[in-house]
Structures are given as structure tokens and as C-alpha cells.
Amino acid sequence: MAFSICIANAQSKKEQIQNLTISLDSLNQVVSNERQIFKQEAQSKDAEISSQKNQIDQLNLRNDSLSTQLNEIKEEKLILSQEFSTLRKRVDSLKQQITELTNNNSTNSFRNSSNFEHFLYYFLSTVYSKKNIDSLIYVSSPIILDLIDPNIGFGRFWNVGAPCNLYNSDGFGYHFYEGYFGETAPEIVNLSFFKNQKPEGGFCDEASSPNGVYYSQVNDLPEDWDMEKGESIPPPLKLKYLKKFVVQVQYDNWIAKTFYFVESNSKWFLLYINDCDCSA
């Protein structure tokens, strides 16, 4: 009886062990499955993190590029602002000088000033800006005669063909006709002034320099041409030691007018207008 009980107990423990083993195997399978699922989810999350990191890196690179472009734009804007400020000051200064020229109390002082810039502003605003200076010269207008020294004289260079000749009387070489008596000059308030500079082109080819009034002191003057002798005629000797300036007005990329001025007895006078074209 006791032996039978021992056998029964042994069988019961064996069954328990088998059951436990089965449960353990089942749990191991569950754990293995959970590990596999976790591993797959972890790999998926790692891939997602890597993708997002790449996107962040690309966004950072783009942000750096945009920041660089923004800084460059800011620098260009600053440069343009400085240039605009400089131009604005020049325009304001010129407007102020022109306003002063319109004041009767300052007109005579500018006309008689030994300062060439003052005289030039007076000359351009009085007989050139929005005026028909060719007609004023042609009819010997009093305002033109006031700008000419009778002891020195005045002349206009012009060419019918290749030679450039000096005309100092009989209409100064102008060929006006009914309905045409010259053209109105541009308004100088819209032009910049360039001291000690010359236009780049504008004679036979369009100018590459900005439109404006270019002026500088010179030693030499244009020469007349003797048609019969086929040789140049130098300027009068009395002009050699006088202070001289050339002024060129560039408008719409072409030289619109060239003036020569001389100083005599501390006053400035119109000496020549050079209207010769590039065929001369």
C-alpha cells in the first residue's frame, strides 16, 4: 500500500514537472516573440530617428545657406543705402546751388565769381538748362553777350564735311530754317556733376559713363583748319596763359554740348562751343 502511494506521488511530480516544462517553453516562446517584436519596433524607430536626423541636418544646412544669403542681402542693402545717401546729398547740394542762382541777390555774384563752379552753375541755369542756347547765340542775345569778352571774342566749331572749322560771325555756322531754330537743352537739375573727369565715349559711340556734366581744366584748345593751305590754325597766343576749362554735357548717353571757358580779369567768359561731329 505504501509502495503504491510512493509510485502515485512520483507520477504526480513527473506530471507537474512536464506541465511546468511546457509552461516554461510557452513562456520562452512568448518572450522570444516579444523580443522579436521589440527588435523590429526598435529597428523601425532607429530608421525613423535616422531619417528625421537627416531631415534636421538638411534643414540646418538650408538654414545656414539662407542665413548666408540673408547676410549678403543685408550687406548689399547697406552699400546701396550708403550710395543712395551720397547721391541724395549731391542732389540736395546741387538743388541748393541752383536755388541760390535764382535769387536776384546772388545772381550777379555768381556771374562775376572767379570760382569756376559758381560761374558754371550760373551759366548752365541761365542760358542752357531747358533753354535754346543755339538760338540765343545766333541772334546775339544780350544775355549771351554778357558772357563773352569782346577783347577775346567767341567762336563756334562746326564741320560741314571732314574739316572742323571755327565760325565767329555771320550766324556762327548755324543753318536754321523755317520751323527749326535749334533744340531745347536738357534740364541740368537731373544731371550729376563730375569734376576733373571726362565722359567715356558719347562722341562716335554711345557713352559708357553716366549722364552728367563733366568739367576739367585744360591747357590746349581746339584748332581751326585752313581749307586752302590744308593746315591747322592754332588759337590766338593771348589765350595761351589764360586759365581754361572744358565742359561736356552728356545726355541720353551722347555728348550733347561741349563748351570752352577762359578766365580774364578774375571773371569767366564763354570762349568756344564745339559742335563738330565725329566725322571731323
Image (tube, grey):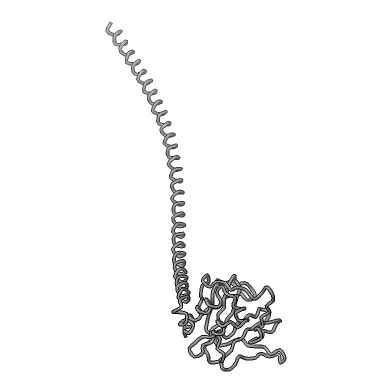
201 versus 148 height, above or below: above
Can the viewer see residue 166?
no
Taking the view exactly as shown, the residue that stands out farthest to the right is 228
> What number of labels is visible?
0
88 or 69, nearer to the observer: 88
11 or 89, nearer to the observer: 89
Taking the view exactly as shown, the residue that stands out farthest to the left is 2
Residue 139 place in picture, x, y as percent: 62, 81
In the image, taking residue 35 as reference, residue 155 lies left or right, namely right
Q: Assign the N terminus to one quadrant of the image.
A: top left
Q: Assign the C terminus to one quadrant of the image.
A: bottom right
Taking the view exactly as shown, the residue that stands out farthest to the top is 1
Q: Residue at x 45, y 79 (%)?
A: 106
Res 174 quadrant in image: bottom right
18 or 108, nearer to the observer: 108
Can the viewer see residue 170?
yes
Residue 245 place in picture, x, y as percent: 53, 84
